[in-house]
Structures are given as structure tokens and as C-alpha cells.
Amino acid sequence: MQAEREHAKTIEQAGAYPRRRSMRSPGQGFEACKRALDIVAAMFGLVVLMPLMIFCACWIKLVDGGPVLYKQWRVGRNGWLFNIYKFRTMSLDAERDGARCATDSDPRVLRGCQWVRKCHADELPQLVNILFGQMSLVGPRPERPEIIEELRDDMPGIERRLAAAPGLTGLAQVRNGYSNDLAGMRRKLAYDLRYLRSRSLVRDMTLILETIPRVWDPTAC
């Protein structure tokens, strides 16, 4: 048994297979600085983007007449559930048959609200979630508990992406873009785990800058 351990250690040191990197937080200093960045950026974003948010709210109210915002349960850090806030871009009965992902030319999307989804303006109320500490600027996107349960068998280890607070943007959003199929979900999980193993403030700042030119996403449903 001791000989086998020594052999495995020798192989790992030789680089035959990569050492498994931890997804634990880099430390309290990182967490404090990341939280400070989140608060400052969220407050700045709410002030600067308020005209756009008011326009989105007025447009939805004009088109549908129903509630402008809606909240939905999402899975946060370490599996804690929280209500995420979004501009409502779908009809009030969009999920009468249960939760399901949006598709191309989805009839549930309100008239004239496709642009709100493609430029991700519907996600702007999540700046409030960031101020509450439920989300961060950068991290894995928060999934619905039903979706995680549905993917558990096909994507073992999906819970590992809950090691950090979910983000408004992340490596998966920058590198993979929008996708709802199983193959796309697997790619996003791989990117999420890669981010968690190498997260730093420099990486977060880089991802924020890389997100800006990708705000308009023609593939978003």
C-alpha cells in the first residue's frame, strides 16, 4: 500500500496527470475586497443605468400592464436559496406547465421585449441582489433548484459550482455565451469550475471588462 502511494505521488509530481486544485475561497482578504468591489460597482451601476431601467419598466407596463418585476427562487452559495429579481419579459402564465428554459422565438416573450433579453437589461435588477450580498458581480450564474435537480444525473458534481456566490457575469458567460442544451450546460459547468479554481481580483476585473463588449448577445432567447 505504501509503495502504491509513493508511485502515485511520483506520477503526479512528474505531471502525468494534473494535481486537483481546490475550489475553496482564496482567503478572507479576497472575500473582503470582492465584497467591497461588489457594493461600489452595484451602487454605481444602479445610478448610471437607472434611465435604462426606468425605460424597461415603462415599456413592460405599456405592453402588458402587469407587474414589471418578478422574483424567482435560485440556488446561491453553499446551496442557500434566495429570490432573484428580474424585469418580467414573459407573460404571466409563462410557467403554468412548469419550469422550462426559453427557446428561439419563444411565444411566451412579451411583444417588443426580445431586445431586453438580448442585451441582458432584464438582469439589471440583480444589482439589488448584489447589494444584499446574495450575489456577486462575477461568479457562476445562479440556477433554479428545479434545473439543478434535473441535471444532477447527467452532470455529476454540479453542486461544486455552489462554492462561491453566484455572479451577474462569469467565465462561462464570456467564453460560452447563452445555451440551454445539455452539451452547453456541461461546457458552462466546466468553465464555472475552472473559474472557481483560479479566482482572484485580477481575474474578476478582467472578466468584467470582457463582459462589456458582449452585453449584446444575439443568441439569447
Image: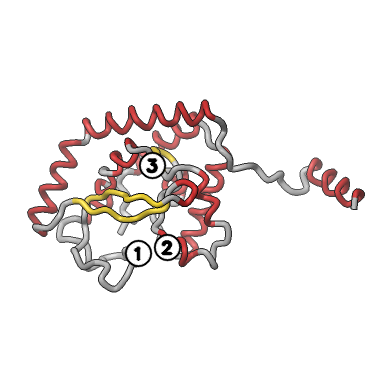
Tell me which residue sits at (13%, 43%) in the image. 55
- Mark 1 residue element: loop
Q: CA distance from mark 1 to mark 2?
A: 9 Å
- Mark 2 residue element: helix
The foreground one among 110 and 85 is 85
Q: Is residue 204 above or below residue 79?
A: above
Q: Amino acid at mark 2?
A: Ile
Tell me which residue sits at (32%, 42%) in the image. 129
Mark 1 touching mark 3, by CB under 8 A?
no
Q: Which badge, 1 or 3, comes first in the chain's sequence?
A: 1
The number of callouts visible is 3
Q: Position of residue 177 (x, y in %)?
A: 41, 51
Q: Position of residue 12 (x, y in %)?
A: 79, 45
Q: Is residue 120 above or below residue 33?
A: below
Q: Amino acid at mark 3?
A: Met
Q: Which badge, 2 or 3, comes first in the chain's sequence?
A: 3
